[in-house]
Image (cartoon, rainbow, N blue to C red):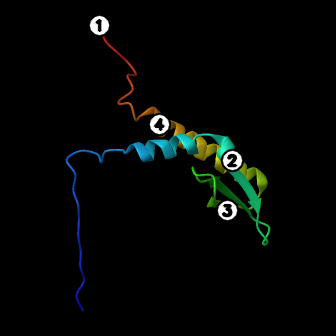
Amino acid sequence: MTFYYQTKTWNSQPQITEETINLWKHLSEKKNWRITQLPNGFYQTEYQDQNEETWNDVTRRETLEGAEQAIDASVEHYAKKLEYVSGPKVVKTFK
């Protein structure tokens, strides 16, 4: 039996595309999210596609509060990603 193994290396971080940035902007708005209850009683978080035709499932939680916390954490995560797209953030300068 033969296995194929491949690795990749980068000298710098992969470049972020405009499509990815637009997705992050979309996901950083809470209005693009919803919670549905599944037949087993769990709650599923979903986000709406940018073309507004379909909903994509993301996580499942036991409680409604847990599902909403998951959405809030996702919105915060993507907002932070957008913050760093423009480059490093200066946190302190010296004179």
Dot 1 surroundings within 10 Å: few (below 14), some, or many (20 or more)?
few
- Front-lying residue, 50 or 42: 50
Could you tell me the amino acid type at mark 1? Lys
Please tell me whether mark 1 or mark 2 is closer to you in this view: 2
Residue located 48% across and 42% down the image: 22
Q: Which residue is mark 4?
A: 82
Secondary structure category for the residue under label 4: helix
Dot 2 surroundings within 10 Å: few (below 14), some, or many (20 or more)?
few
- The residues bearing labels 1 and 4 have C-alpha atoms spaced at a distance of 30 Å
Q: Which residue is mark 3?
A: 60
First in sequence: mark 2 or mark 3?
3
Could you tell me the amino acid type at mark 2? Gln
Q: Residue furthest bottom?
A: 1
Residue located 29% across and 7% down the image: 95
Residue 69 tag number: 2
* Callouts 3 and 4 close, C-beta under 8 Å: no
Secondary structure category for the residue under label 2: helix
How far from the left and from the top, in percent, is residue 74?
59, 47
